Image (spheres, rainbow, N blue to C red):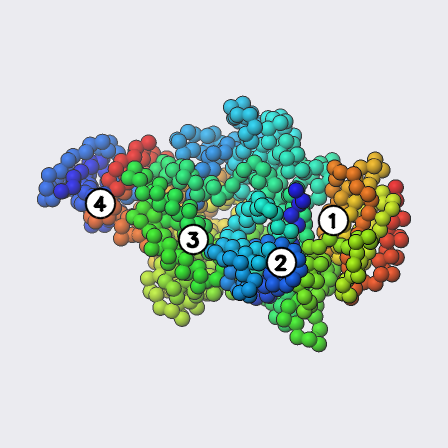
């Protein structure tokens, strides 16, 4: 079975996690999402989208489902994995004080799952004071440190984004459609053969032919990529002709052995606002040289 | 007319100042009808004399005010801990003081398991084992084919063998936080925190919820309690799903089930919805399952450096701990539940956590009056005189973690908060002097359930190395006996029914082999527990 990709939505109380989740449930993205939330309190479903609802589950006519997770998150993850048919993508709302990496690591550890990013939602106007709070500031800052993508909510237009550069190198987005988010974390990057014209906000990239590398060199090469190239997936082969699967999401680079043979190829998607095609090409020109075996 | 049964005992410690000691107690309809001598109930009609307990000493059934249901069913797994421990069936499992002893025990059990079944252990604490840290290489000598997983005593870590690593797909190329690797780049077998343990738990069927909810877990819990002389026990932090509650009500409803359970609902989410749920649960209470309270988790643990502590912090310079609920969430939850009339048991280990909670309760009380709220600070390990005084003013009770003094006291001096604050940890003396309602507890299965042991800890304040930790905070034996009976009952708002041998209360007794008041304080933990009487029915071990 295809591994279930999991994205964790983190952020302090009132940051706007539920608003983002409401968008994910309502927008027309074509994915069957399963979303685990702490409670249904502020989950808001349009009547025409609602298929059924009970104490723990809201089913939508677009195939998405939203469930409460109770106090045992890992039990809920197990239930999600046992669900048939498996959803296309799992989204977990972390509690307001949770360290999202402690949840997202499960997707790296579990062979039946795939890591699909930590998105930390930040209330733009409230953040500067929150960060200085002696009781909770360090935990809020840590959520940003762990992020693959920072999603600024409630940002008044024209105001500068909150300064988080000292906490993370992750891209900072604000006031975007949730579809942008799913294009980055949930959907496969378009390959050269299937690619429609990329969304104007996105930039696509692919490399094929002889990509033979593994281990530290490959990891270092991927780590050095322009940060606007958010996601990369594909296969490479090593000097023993073994195949390795590559999954890059934000700060997370996962390279693991792959039993099946696959044609070496990498595809990626980035944010046009943060990176230009020439920068990616320049990076790959250097990197691909460095990792050749 | 129901039968009147008059139990004779060598001595009866009633914990009731009107008749502090007696030799006979009369029971009718499961309740205490009279206390005194052989003729104490004659005025009520014909009596049956029962001499089956004549050689024993009776106390009010002991009350464990902070424990978890898992303390029973965890014995489905093999005990691998350092301290001697008795299982629910009464078998003594020797503490294991070396790696070889751990491997030896596992090998013996392994030989008895059916093919295909995993071998799962619990209670390992490497801090006490000299030499190498347990790893897959050691466990592989037990079996190279059967998956093996050994949970550590804190339940945050485990160690597995190569067969289990393979099941989870962990190898040299795994690059996951919490999958510990050795100098050779291969996983050592140690897995840290839930994310790394998750693939193993899923594949070996280790399910913490089932350990707390299934029928056998409830029955084991009653056995653990009876062995400790406990007739009323808490299950603090329970999910209380409807189907789980149905099971608990059915099992506990059996006449022969000798235990009263006080579960507290795990707090999460919106305070209004939480309060509604707690009140709905309260309406389902029976005489043996008492629902309606809520448990809040605020900070972590001191020995894990995750408790929120005030200045000067941890002696090793570790960063301050973590909040499991944000302070503003603690405030809104306290306010919401207090206003709705829901009693709260609030986990606070570090002194910053207890301070935030006292502030939150003080605010809650300013906006809604409920004088007999009965809120309890649980653990309260670093609370000082000033915090106790504020609790007294606000009517807050405390349930202090006396067992920590013995189990972790030395570590607290050396590694966590240093001697000055360790000497006033779990300050039962100060809490009593402030006039508070005080319970003391085991937090089983974190430490073994045994209120007489817990009382011994509060009296002697001795650590495992034999040091006395802050003699000034010691209490007397009678005070300690109060804390494991009436005091604990008061924290559960059940002192009108249990906690002393008083006419009208339930006929719940601890059956002991000696009188704790005639025992040297240093030997209090050795007073034999022979069983309990629950609702007038003896359950001897």
Q: Position of residue B196 (x, y in %)?
A: 62, 43
The residue mark sitting in front, 1 or 3, is: 1
Residue placed most toward the observer, A10 or B418: A10
> In what element is the residue under mark 3?
strand
**Is residue B31 rendered to the left or right of residue B200?**
left
Position of the N terminus of chain B, as image quadrant, is top left
**Is residue B294 rendered to the left or right of residue A105?**
left
Dot 4, how many residues are within 10 Å of its Cα: few (below 14), some (14-19), or many (20+)? many
> In what element is the residue under mark 4?
strand
Residue under circle 3? B265
Of all residues, the one furthest to the bottom in this rendering is A158
State how far apart marks 3 and 4 are (Cα).
29 Å
State how far apart marks 2 and 4 are (Cα).
54 Å
Q: Position of residue B123 (x, y in %)?
A: 52, 37
> In what element is the residue under mark 1?
strand
State how far apart marks 1 and 3 are (Cα).
41 Å
Dot 2, how many residues are within 10 Å of its Cα: few (below 14), some (14-19), or many (20+)? many
Q: Chain of mark 2?
A: A
Residue under circle 4? B31
Dot 1, how many residues are within 10 Å of its Cα: few (below 14), some (14-19), or many (20+)? many
Q: Do marks 3 and 4 share a subunit?
A: yes
Residue under circle 1? A247
Q: Quadrant of residue B278?
A: bottom left
Q: Do marks 1 and 3 share a subunit?
A: no
Q: Residue at x 47, y 56 (%)?
A: A55
All told, the count of numbered labels is: 4
Q: Residue at x 46, y 35 (%)?
A: B75
Which mark, residue A9? 2
Dot 3, how many residues are within 10 Å of its Cα: few (below 14), some (14-19), or many (20+)? many
Q: Earlier in the sequence, mark 1 or mark 2?
A: 2
The residue mark sitting in front, 3 or 4, is: 3
């Amino acid at each position: 079975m295809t591994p279930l990709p999991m994205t964790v939505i983190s952020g302090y109380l009132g940051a706007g996690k539920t608003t983002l989740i409401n968008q994910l449930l309502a927008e027309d993205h074509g994915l069957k999402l399963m979303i685990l939330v702490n409670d249904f309190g502020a989950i808001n479903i349009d009547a025409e989208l609602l298929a059924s609802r009970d104490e723990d589950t809201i089913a939508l006519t677009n195939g998405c489902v939203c469930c409460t997770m109770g106090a045992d998150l890992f039990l809920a993850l197990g239930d999600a994995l046992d669900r048939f048919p498996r959803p296309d993508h799992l989204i977990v709302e972390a509690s307001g004080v949770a360290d999202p990496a402690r949840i997202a690591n499960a997707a790296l550890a579990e062979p039946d799952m795939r890591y699909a990013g930590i998105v930390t939602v930040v209330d733009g106007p409230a953040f500067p004071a929150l960060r200085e709070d002696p009781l909770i500031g360090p935990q809020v800052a840590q959520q940003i440190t762990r992020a693959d993508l920072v999603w600024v909510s409630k940002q008044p237009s024209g105001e500068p984004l909150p300064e988080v550069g000292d906490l993370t190198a992750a891209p900072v987005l604000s006031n975007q459609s949730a579809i942008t988010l799913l294009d980055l974390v949930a959907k496969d990057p378009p390959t050269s053969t299937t690619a429609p014209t990329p969304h104007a906000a996105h930039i696509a990239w692919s490399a094929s032919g002889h990509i033979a590398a593994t281990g530290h060199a490959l990891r270092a090469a991927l780590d050095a990529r322009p940060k606007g190239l958010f996601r990369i997936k594909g296969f490479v082969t090593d000097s023993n002709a073994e195949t390795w699967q590559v999954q890059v999401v934000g700060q997370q680079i996962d390279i693991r052995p792959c039993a099946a043979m696959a044609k070496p190829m990498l595809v990626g998607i980035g944010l046009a606002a943060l990176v230009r095609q020439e920068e990616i090409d320049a990076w790959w020109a250097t990197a691909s040289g460095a990792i050749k075996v | 007319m129901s039968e009147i049964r008059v139990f004779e005992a060598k001595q009866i410690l009633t914990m009731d100042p009107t008749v502090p000691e007696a030799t006979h107690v009369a029971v009718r309809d499961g309740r205490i009808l009279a206390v005194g001598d052989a003729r104490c109930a004659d005025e009520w009609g014909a009596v049956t004399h029962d001499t089956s307990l004549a050689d024993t000493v009776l106390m009010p059934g002991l009350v464990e005010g902070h424990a978890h249901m898992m303390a029973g069913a965890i014995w489905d797994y093999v005990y691998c801990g350092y301290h001697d421990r008795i299982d629910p069936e009464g078998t003594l499992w020797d503490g294991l003081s070396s790696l070889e002893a751990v491997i030896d025990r596992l090998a013996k059990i392994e030989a008895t398991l059916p093919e295909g079944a995993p071998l799962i252990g619990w209670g390992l604490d490497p801090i006490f084992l000299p030499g190498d840290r347990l790893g897959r290489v050691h466990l592989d000598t037990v079996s190279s084919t059967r998956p093996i997983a050994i949970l550590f005593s804190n339940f945050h870590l485990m160690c597995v063998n190569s067969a289990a690593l393979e099941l989870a797909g962990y190898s040299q190329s795994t690059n996951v936080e919490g999958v510990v690797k050795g100098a050779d780049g291969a996983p050592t077998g140690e897995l840290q925190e839930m994310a790394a343990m998750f693939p193993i738990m899923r594949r070996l069927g280790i399910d913490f919820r089932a350990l707390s909810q299934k029928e056998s877990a409830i029955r084991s819990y009653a056995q653990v309690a009876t062995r400790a002389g406990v007739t009323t026990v808490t299950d603090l932090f329970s999910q209380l799903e409807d189907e789980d509650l149905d099971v608990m009500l059915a099992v506990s409803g059996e006449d022969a089930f000798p235990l009263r359970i006080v579960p507290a609902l795990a707090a999460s989410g919106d305070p209004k919805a939480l309060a509604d749920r707690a009140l709905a649960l309260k309406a389902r209470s029976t005489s043996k399952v008492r629902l309606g309270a809520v448990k809040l988790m605020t900070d972590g643990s001191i020995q894990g450096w995750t408790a929120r502590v005030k200045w000067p912090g941890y002696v090793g310079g570790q960063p301050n701990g973590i909040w499991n609920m944000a302070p503003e969430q603690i405030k809104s939850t306290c306010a919401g539940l207090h206003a709705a009339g829901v009693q709260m048991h609030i986990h606070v280990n570090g002194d910053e956590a207890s301070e935030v909670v006292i502030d939150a309760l003080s605010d809650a009380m300013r906006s809604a009056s409920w004088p007999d709220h009965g809120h309890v600070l649980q653990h309260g390990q670093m609370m000082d005189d000033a915090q106790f005084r504020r609790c007294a003013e606000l009517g807050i009770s405390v349930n202090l973690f006396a067992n920590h003094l013995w189990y972790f006291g030395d570590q607290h001096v050396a590694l966590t908060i240093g001697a000055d604050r360790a000497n006033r940890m779990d300050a039962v003396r100060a809490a009593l002097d402030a006039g508070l309602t005080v319970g003391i507890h085991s937090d089983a299965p974190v430490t073994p359930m045994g209120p007489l042991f817990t009382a011994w800890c509060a009296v002697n304040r001795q650590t495992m190395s034999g040091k006395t930790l802050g003699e000034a905070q010691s209490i007397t034996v009678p005070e300690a006996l109060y804390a494991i009976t009436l005091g604990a009952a008061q924290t559960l708002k059940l002192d009108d029914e249990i906690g002393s041998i008083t006419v009208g209360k339930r006929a719940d007794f601890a059956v002991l082999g000696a009188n704790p008041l005639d025992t040297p304080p240093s030997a209090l933990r050795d007073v034999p527990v022979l069983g309990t009487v629950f609702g007038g029915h003896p359950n001897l071990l």
